[in-house]
Amino acid sequence: MDRRRGESPSLHLVMNERAAEVRGSFPLLSSDGDLLDRFNIRVVLPADYPQALPIVFETGGRIPKTADRHVFPRAGDCCVILEDTRWESFPIGASFRTYLDVPLRNYFLGQSLVERGDPWPFGDWSHGGRGILEYYSQAIESDDLKVVRSFVGLLALAQAKGHHTCFCGSESRLRDCCKDIVDMWRERVPPHVARRSRDWLAPAVLKRRRPRGNVQATRQ
């Protein structure tokens, strides 16, 4: 997987009974192709990849397994991107090379800088449901949980029809109100992702102190 100068072919595809994995040393390159750092990684490509995101583990012991460093403490996998934001940097159908060059590079660039005492360079979402709430609040310019959850609920439907009530609280039909916004975001966020996010936005779940499950929480 040699991509640019300053890099050795140190990532290798390994097949096993459950999934394909990419293992080795991930070279962190500058925009000019110069080697900045390296991280030892293992990337699991699940059976439903590319619909599902790769699952990344840092195997060199450099990154603490804490939510503050964007690693799930229980499983040890990295919070590379918030899945709802996938359309921005690694849309379904994009090549694995794109994943390496954009979200994964940005994630490890952030880790390298934080390790040196610098702030996270791209900003980051809160963990669990609160990060999802922050993302969609920014998208629709409302921090009202009821409004945000109603919006995400429309994204979660198999089909958002014009007679559905609009999410914004106007009590108007969707076709007479904010249908264009819903249609735009339905093209970006698959229903199965929106359904998961809607569940995370339940008030009882938001009260949990620690996130559970594989929710990606890092901005790009």
Image (cartoon, grey):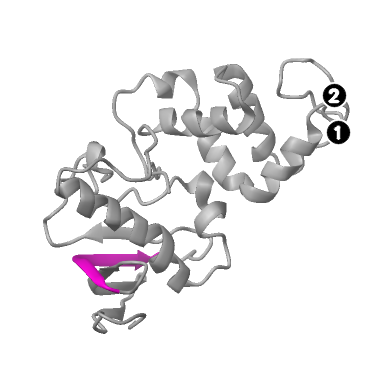
Specify whether 67 is left or right of 201. left
In the picture, the quarter occupied by the N terminus is bottom left
- The outermost residue toward the front is 32
> What range is drawn magenta here?
34-46
Residue 181 location (% of width, % of height):
73, 36
* Viewer-side residue, 181 vs 45: 181
Quarter-of-image position of residue 24: bottom left
Task: Name the element at disc 2.
Answer: loop
- The outermost residue toward the left is 61
Q: Counting other residues with Cα less than 10 Å from the Cα at mark 2, is it few (<14), some (14-19), or many (20 or more)?
A: some
Kind of residue sitting beneath label 1: Gly
Q: Is residue 194 magenta?
A: no
Quarter-of-image position of residue 139: top right
Residue at image position (78%, 15%) is 170
* Viewer-side residue, 59 vs 26: 26
Specify whether 212 is left or right of 102. left
Question: Which residue was labeled with disc 2?
Answer: 173
In this rendering, the count of numbered labels is 2
Residue at image position (30%, 69%) is 29
Kind of residue sitting beneath label 2: Arg
Specify whether 152 is left or right of 168. left
Task: Name the element at disc 1.
Answer: loop
Q: Is residue 75 visible?
A: yes
Residue 148 location (% of width, % of height):
59, 25
Quarter-of-image position of residue 59: bottom left
Residue 163 location (% of width, % of height):
86, 29
Evaluate if marks 2 and 1 touch, with contact meaning CB atoms under 8 Å apart. yes
Question: Which residue was labeled with disc 1?
Answer: 162
Decide: is 191 above or below 50.
Answer: above
Q: Counting other residues with Cα less than 10 Å from the Cα at mark 1, is it few (<14), some (14-19), or many (20 or more)?
A: some
